[in-house]
Image (cartoon, grey):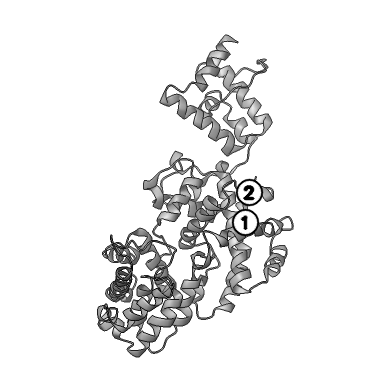
Amino acid sequence: DLKYDIEHKYLHYESTKKTRLDQQKSIGARKMNKLSPRAERAAKRAAFRSSLTLSKEDKVPEGNSLPNKKKSVSLVSIEKAGAVEEFKNNTKTLQDIDVSESSSSDIEDVDKDFALNDAEVRHMLQFYLCQMRWQYGLIVNPGQFKKFDDEIKRRCPPNEQSQDLESCQELMHLFFKGPARGERWVPWHCATCEQELFLFQEVRTRQDFSEEALFAMSTAFSASRVVPMWRQIILPALAKDPQAIINDPFALFQPGGPVHKQMVNWRAQGNILHTTSYNPYPPLGAKGDKFTDYIAKRHAEYADLGKRAFPLLQQQNNQTLMQQLDTHFQTLHKVGPTMSKVLLVTTHLWYPQLEILDQGCLVGDGAALAFDFLYKKKNTHAKTKRLHHLFNYLESFIDRLEPRFKPMLQFLSHESRLKFPEIPSKSLPDILTIYDLQVQLCEWRKFRKNVDKRMTLTKRSPPTFI
């Protein structure tokens, strides 16, 4: 009993860094791995024997009686006692899957930096199904949520139903009312969001512009990404001189010019000049008319950026096109990884045959924050590796993690292609892509952080993979 008390106090003693880390591992092990009562009792018995009587080379004797006391046990103690096998045999979590088999050669083996939180992964996947359901019910076939639910029953295994998704109505309502309000929502397929859909339907299909001018317009649009302003002010002005955005974009948006004056009036009427999805980072003191001047100049700079990037798209079999475009985009002041990612996604959707983002994607700030939920250990310097690790992990085990994912994505892609024939079919993929994953990590992070802090999404139904 005395030795037990000493061990017990040692594990709870917080005067040293090592002890605090051991306690965190102990708490994390119980939460992450969800030991069954039988496995937890066995692990405690083995660890207790090891701490009192055994060296590292000894084996745990059988049949020893133990004091009937509760004790905190770390994973290190379990391993020392030789109880790892019983621990694995009595628990089935996402961590039991050999993720290293799905890692590509340029990705590090799974270690402590790549330990996933299985509860968070389940929460993320269920949210992704909600994203698909609401894309179908709000964009592809408005109001027809029941048809999506019926397809789950028809396409998925008998034990996979839609009640858990239907029960998320209130949470998704809060999501659309808050962090995904209006233009800030990106559904599962990026090409069907309000802003990208505008580019495909009202810009990409224009026959009176050259391909170079259209691409310059797509990059200039990201200077504000305000669809009503583009529809009422900028597109009519560009239609008068289709080559103006190529010949001299700075003259087109110059202060005091026709476009600038209309933008001033537009703002005076209470309308926004820039999307609320991200910060344009105006210079200090850029308020009132100076802010309008800044946004107008920003349009000219982004148009010129697209004009200078267009020759890169003409190169054939360019294996480093993403890196070249990213480097080029970030030469413009105040264009960082997030803004460059926005430009790259639009470019990839417009030219899917170039496969710009098929093998990799930049990780924006929103997706990087999502990794803090998904991975046990925070590491801001490993965000690109973690994106690849998570993608390979899901690609290999998505059928076991969420059996409804693949069949419902195929259904959604098919219906979306029928609804929007102007969008290239490859831009509405029926498989998981790394750039869709990156974008959806941003959406899940907004939902997880601002709407479902208590993770009630997965509590509405039993986990799919246990």
Q: Amino acid at mark 2?
A: Thr
- x and y, in percent, of residue 465 in the image: 64, 48
**Left or right of residue 157, residue 230 in this image:** left
Q: Amino acid at mark 1?
A: Leu
**Left or right of residue 439, residue 415 in this image:** right
- x and y, in percent, of residue 346 in the image: 41, 70
Kindly check if marks 1 and 2 are in contact, taking CB atoms under 8 A apart as contact: yes
**Left or right of residue 122, residue 422 in this image:** left
Looking at the image, residue 75 lies above or below residue 257: above
Q: Nearer the viewer, residue 149 or 426?
A: 149
Q: Which residue is mark 1?
A: 171
Extreme residue toward the top, this view: 2
Q: Which mark is residue 324?
A: none
User: Taking the image as drawn, is residue 30 in sight?
Assistant: yes
User: Taking the image as drawn, is residue 204 in sight?
Assistant: no
Alpha-carbon distance for marks 1 and 2?
A: 9 Å
Residue at 46% over, 82% down: 202
Residue at 59% over, 50% down: 122
